[in-house]
Image (spheres, rainbow, N blue to C red):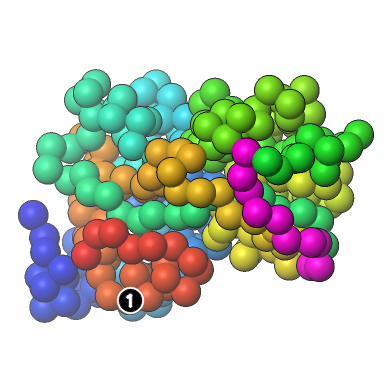
Amino acid sequence: MLTVAAVTALSLSSLAAQAQDVTVFAAASLKTALDRVVADYQADGGAPVTVSYAGSSALAKQIEQGAPADIFISASTDWMDKLDKAGLIKAGSRSDLLGNTLVLIAHGGDAPKVEITPALDLAGMIGEGKLAMALVDSVPAGVYGKAALTSLGLWASVEPKVAQSDNVRAALALVARDEAPYGIVYSTDAAADDKVSIVGTFPEASHEPIVYPAGLIASARDGAEAFLTYLKGEKASAVFKAEGFTVLAR
């Protein structure tokens, strides 16, 4: 297995010469940061990388059905666990790459801040509008959001007002377009769109830790391991940190 030191010792251009293109299936919330990392990797001479973004649940199901992915980066451990147990993740390649924070957002840049506690009248804030969320029973951001609201005793009052989207970036877009006054996304998503603002952060204890595991698909092609190693290196880590992620794997 390549180490970060090994990749540093070998030039990326020499690795690229030996490798095929790399296909990554990644959680939609990674798009802004991962696009930057891919651009840096290729500028440094790495093999071409193509990224398919969607909800982690949809990507995992595509991999189960034989989609030609080399690397999977999920926004929760559950979907990675499922593929791992099915023998679809290469043994020893999996690691927890990143962490994130769950936030409540509103349209515009100057929405009043709130403290997210059991006393919050979130249903009253939403009024006749909608609360934009990713799919609450399958997409990690939606699952975390429902868990947090349930833990705080707020789910029953807001459930009829929830507008579910296929992934967290689609939920973000609903608020950015002012089609929903509020939404629940990751802090990194909120930072990626200046048409929304964070009005509150959910207590960490209200939901499971937000962890992004990454691993090689069992049938991964040559070159995939080099890019997975690059994702854990200093240059990629600096990008992830700049985009608001917590770096877990080095």
Crowding at label 1, few (<14), some or many (≥20) Cα neighbours within 10 Å? Answer: few
Q: Is residue 102 magenta?
A: no
Quadrant placement of the C terminus: bottom left
Image location (x, y in percent) of residue 170: 68, 43
In front of the other: 140 or 37 = 140
In front of the other: 244 or 35 = 244
Image location (x, y in percent) of residue 160: 77, 23
The image quarter in which residue 163 lies: top right
Magenta residues span 109-118
- Is 143 positioned to the left or the right of 191 in the image? left
Quadrant placement of the N terminus: bottom left
Q: Is residue 116 magenta?
A: yes
Q: Mark 1 points at which residue?
A: 235
- Is 136 positioned to the left or the right of 84 in the image? right
- Is 78 positioned to the left or the right of 2 in the image? right
Image location (x, y in percent) of residue 79: 37, 30
- Is 229 positioned to the left or the right of 243 in the image? left
Q: Residue at x 38, y 44 (%)?
A: 209
Q: Which residue is drawn at 88% across and 37% down?
A: 127
**Magenta-drawn stretch, dominant element (helix, strand or loop):** loop
Q: Is residue 227 above or below residue 235?
A: above
